[in-house]
Image (cartoon, rainbow, N blue to C red):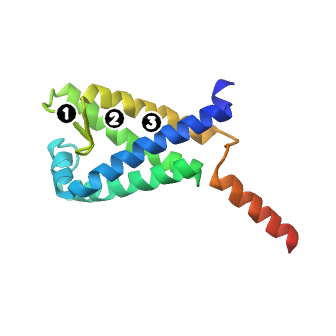
Amino acid sequence: MWFKNIFVDIGLRLGIGIIFLIAGVSKLPMHLEFIDVVAAYRILPPSLTGVYASALPWLEVTIGVCLILGLFIRVFSVVSLPITISFIVANASAIAFRLGGECGCFGRLATTSYEAALGIDVFLLIGALLLFFQRRHFITLDSRLISLFRKRQHLV
């Protein structure tokens, strides 16, 4: 199966990880503006808008770094799913209600149309699902930690 290929695994981890890392890092310096961006979608209740907008960049950075390094791949692929679904809902509603402007996905670093952002979100969703179901991962911290743990168990 093509999706069980180690190069697909590496490509997905790096692609998804880099997208999440860039998105999170680009939102951190514009924290207050990003709260306004999230509020403009009018999807979340006002009491949750600030919490979501404050936690999201840090979650994106964490997911990105862990996927790039290959640390807890299955855990962070699952953690990324509800976040990615929230992106899909936000961008689909922006398209459906013809909101003006562009997506704030990458902060001030880059702007994109809602349609392009929705395409990226679909890639993130499918990629995270494929990563979750991968059995073997290539060049990961997980594999190094497991082998160190096994060696240590044999020494005891």
Q: Earlier in the sequence, mark 2 or mark 1?
A: 2
**C-alpha distance separating marks 2 and 1:** 14 Å
Q: Earlier in the sequence, mark 3 or mark 2?
A: 2
Q: Quadrant of residue 82?
A: top left
Percent position of residue 50, x then y: 22, 58
Looking at the image, residue 6 sits to the left or right of residue 15; the answer is: right
Dot 3 alpha-carbon crowd within 10 angstroms: few under 14, some 14 to 19, many 20 or more: many
Dot 2 alpha-carbon crowd within 10 angstroms: few under 14, some 14 to 19, many 20 or more: many
Looking at the image, residue 124 sits to the left or right of residue 91; the answer is: right
Amino acid under disc 3: Leu
Count of numbered circles in the view: 3
Residue drawn 67% across the image and 43% down it: 138
Examine the rendered structure and indicate whether residue 61 appears above or below residue 10. Answer: below
**From this viewpoint, which residue is outermost toward the left?**
100
Looking at the image, residue 67 sits to the left or right of residue 46; the answer is: right
Dot 1 alpha-carbon crowd within 10 angstroms: few under 14, some 14 to 19, many 20 or more: some
- Element under disc 3: helix
Residue drawn 80% across the image and 69% down it: 152
Q: Quadrant of the N terminus?
A: top right
Query: Label 3: which residue?
Result: 124
**C-alpha distance separating marks 3 and 2:** 10 Å
Query: Label 2: which residue?
Result: 88
Percent position of residue 150, x then y: 80, 62
**C-alpha distance separating marks 3 and 1:** 19 Å
Amino acid under disc 2: Ile
Examine the rendered structure and indicate whether residue 84 appears above or below residue 92. Answer: below
Amino acid under disc 1: Glu
**Residue nearest the viewer, comparing 28 with 34:** 28
Query: Label 1: which residue?
Result: 102
Q: Earlier in the sequence, mark 3 or mark 1?
A: 1
Residue drawn 22% across the image and 27% down it: 95
